[in-house]
Amino acid sequence: MENKERRVGCVSRGIRLPIIRQGDHLADIVTDSVLQAAESEGFSLRDRDVIAITESIVARAQGNYCSVADIAADIKAKLGGGTIGVIFPILSRNRFAICLRGIARGARKIVLMLSYPSDEVGNHLLTWDQVDEAGVDPYTDVLTLEEYHRLFGSTVHEFTGVDYVKYYMDLVRAEGAEVEVIFANHPQAILSYADKVLTCDIHTRKRTKRILEKAGAAEVYSLDGIMTTSINGCGYNEEYGLLGSNKSTEETIKLFPNRCQPLVEEIQNRILQATGKHVEVMVYGDGAFKDPQGKIWELADPVVSPAFTNGLIGTPNELKLKYLADNDFANLSGEALKDAITASIMKKNEDLKGKMASEGTTPRQLTDLLGSLCDLTSGSGDKGTPVVLVQGYFDNYSN
């Protein structure tokens, strides 16, 4: 019988699930949904397929929620309830606004220090052209609210149409706290206004906290230090605190899922028992990609994947096909070229780091790459596919 040449490589499928509620047994639901999808659509699971579950449904099943009042209580206990410097928050109604309500409710006064021209993940208050035209040096200049308005007026976000400066000020005042806003990019600037500081950046938080402590701050917390234990029975995240949280209702926040390694291992075992196939499983949040139009870096979670099975540790080890075709085998074509490249792939070294033939491949963590693929597949709206099945990701041209 003639062997048919394989024509399809990597495939990413969104898997539809029922709406997940607190207490649902997610391992059963995910396993059953993947198997039912395979039967319905006529495909089979294979070894090293990847089943990815969005962090949102993991946290929902766990019931990992807290309230604005819970945040306020934790802020007051840790930062004293007086004047608090709140620095480097991202500009987000979904991510930070409800956290700010809880922070403000636990303080007498908030000194809000915004980075400019954009926040950490690329939401712009201003354009670089505006900053240049105003003759401002964002690396050294500290602007008061009055100076900011005199130079730039009132600015709104390109996509949301929200004036985040006014929006955040209104939120703080609505919680009964005073508010003062400044604009700066070096952490020490806040210490002229407050000696107790909550640093709200995500990926640079450890450096920011270290700088503030060295500069003499009386008390410094980052968002991963808030809501790390339960208050009155509410949810918490012992590793990431408020990082990775999302608005649920006007008074509640869904936290990043807690301790989900047992979940991915259980699903892996259930699939093995049901099919005999050894799949990999991961929980994913934001992808790690940047929008070239809005300049927004998508990753507002502390990590792309908080839990994954062992087969997803590491980075790709790939050859660059066009390099081989243009250099090593420039004199070949057709079947001879195909056979030569296939042979090169089959005998490649286990570690190609530093080799010219791997130049231009993607030296990032597998979970970051897969999480980005899955985030784009599932979307964040009404697709109803919070589980993604990726097949053929670890295949290559020789398979």
Image (cartoon, rainbow, N blue to C red):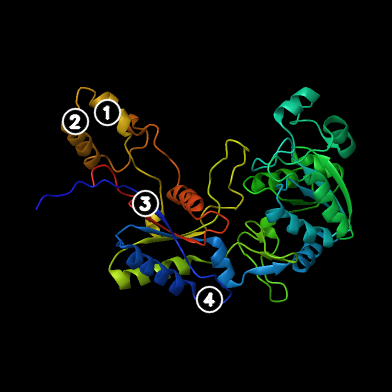
Q: What is the spatial separation of the Cα atoms under label 2 and label 3, in whole angstroms?
A: 26 Å
Q: Which residue is rendered at x = 76% and y = 28% of the image?
A: 131
Position of 303 with respect to 388 (left or right) is right
Q: What is the spatial separation of the Cα atoms under label 1 and label 4, in whole angstroms?
A: 52 Å
Label 4, secondary structure: give it: loop
Task: Say which mark, if any, is on residue 325.
Answer: 1
Which residue corresponds to mark 4?
24
Name which of mark 2 and mark 1 comes first in the sequence: 1
Which residue corresponds to mark 2?
334
Residue 102 x/y as whole percent: 78, 61
Which residue corresponds to mark 3?
11
Neighbor class of circle 3 (other Cα within 10 Å; few <14, some 14-19, many 20+) is few
Neighbor class of circle 1 (other Cα within 10 Å; few <14, some 14-19, many 20+) is some
Label 1, secondary structure: give it: helix
Image marks 2 and 1: residues in contact by CB distance under 8 Å: no
Residue 324 x/y as whole percent: 28, 29
Q: What is the spatial separation of the Cα atoms under label 1 and label 3, in whole angstroms?
A: 25 Å
Name which of mark 1 and mark 3 comes first in the sequence: 3
Position of 281 with respect to 112 (left or right) is left
Type of amino acid at the residue the image marks with label 1: Ala
Neighbor class of circle 4 (other Cα within 10 Å; few <14, some 14-19, many 20+) is some
Name which of mark 2 and mark 3 comes first in the sequence: 3
Type of amino acid at the residue the image marks with label 4: Asp
Task: Say which mark, if any, is on residue 229.
Answer: none
Viewer-nearest residue: 330 or 109: 330
Image marks 1 and 4: residues in contact by CB distance under 8 Å: no
